[in-house]
Image (tube, grey):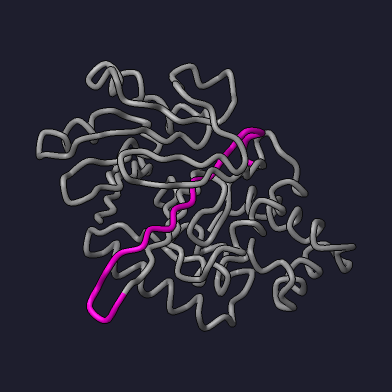
Amino acid sequence: MRLLALPALSDNYIWALSGDDESALIVDPGDAAPVLAAAAHGLRPVGILLTHHHDDHIGGTPALRERWPDIPVFAPDDERIASATARVGDGTRLHVDGWSLTALAVPGHTRSHVAYYMEQDHLERGGRATDRIVFSGDTLFSLGCGRLFEGTPAQMLVSLTRLAALPDDTRVCCGHEYTLSNAAFASVVEPANPALRRRIEKAQAMRNAGRPSLPSSIGDERATNPFLRTREPAVIAAVTARLGHAPADETETFAELRRWKDGFRA
């Protein structure tokens, strides 16, 4: 199994999940060009997964379907995604060319946003192992989360809590290269978090080497992402200082974090 992050537009990633025969699932192709370039070197798309309707995640789909007319396009039930050939909802199981995934409803960034979760067993030296991947679109980012364009703080908190409950070793394949910009905010919220400092050093080294900082893991996000740490005393204390009073509940903690991040400038 190979997991490729194809850079697109200004800071997007199009994800390609491929097997030994180069057949690949393509996730959120905001631009067709990177996929067509990869296909020129042997990649063979067999399915497209779309997480939400924003053009930087779906804009390349018509051109890809023109190149591969029979390719299925899976997307949430949203009329704004006209290129879909099959609609998915919460719990929909997908089986595409040997790949099996489950759609998870994760509204907040948009009202119909979904993520795609995969568990795939494979043999390695010493026995059987399991690969776990979640394609989280713009709901969960490395060290951050998406803006609330259509959903409420309560909805987004539920969606993030759901993703945070996935196994620690689940690789998080999100839609943008935002790790270092999100790290600046996370460092203000939790300046004394040693795990966060280690993640920033690692991400900076990867970017300096010209490599993506992704995927991250659910375990790393739980340890360092302030939007998954709204029950942590340090995060609550930071929000309390900003509000001038203790937040009434976890939803208010999250809502204030998101408002803070919306106006944050490093």
User: Residue 66 lies in what quarter of the image?
Assistant: top left
Quarter of image, res 222: bottom right
Is the N terminus in the top left, top right, bottom left or bottom right quadrant? bottom left
Q: Position of residue 171 (x, y in %)?
A: 42, 61
Look at the magenta stretch and give its main secondary structure: strand
Q: Residue 136 vs residue 89: left or right?
A: left
263 is higher (above) or lower (below) than 84: below
Question: Please, is residue 141 above or below residue 208 in the view?
Answer: above
Residue 170, given in percent of the width and then of the height, sits at: 46, 64
Judged left or right of residue 97, residue 175 is right
Residue at (32% x, 45% y) in the render: 98
- Residue at x 36% of width, y 38% of height: 96
Q: Is residue 29 above or below residue 154?
A: above
237 and 138: which is toward the camera: 138
Quadrant of the image occupied by residue 245? bottom right
Q: Position of residue 234 (x, y in %)?
A: 70, 77
Highlighted range, magenta? 109-127
| Along the line of sight, the residue nearer the viewer: 233 or 101 | 101
Q: Position of residue 265 (x, y in %)?
A: 56, 54
Query: Number of numbered discs present?
Result: 0
Q: Residue at x 37, y 31 (%)?
A: 30
Residue occupying image coordinates x 38% and y 58%: 120
Asked if residue 135 is positioned above or below residue 181 in the image, the reply reads above
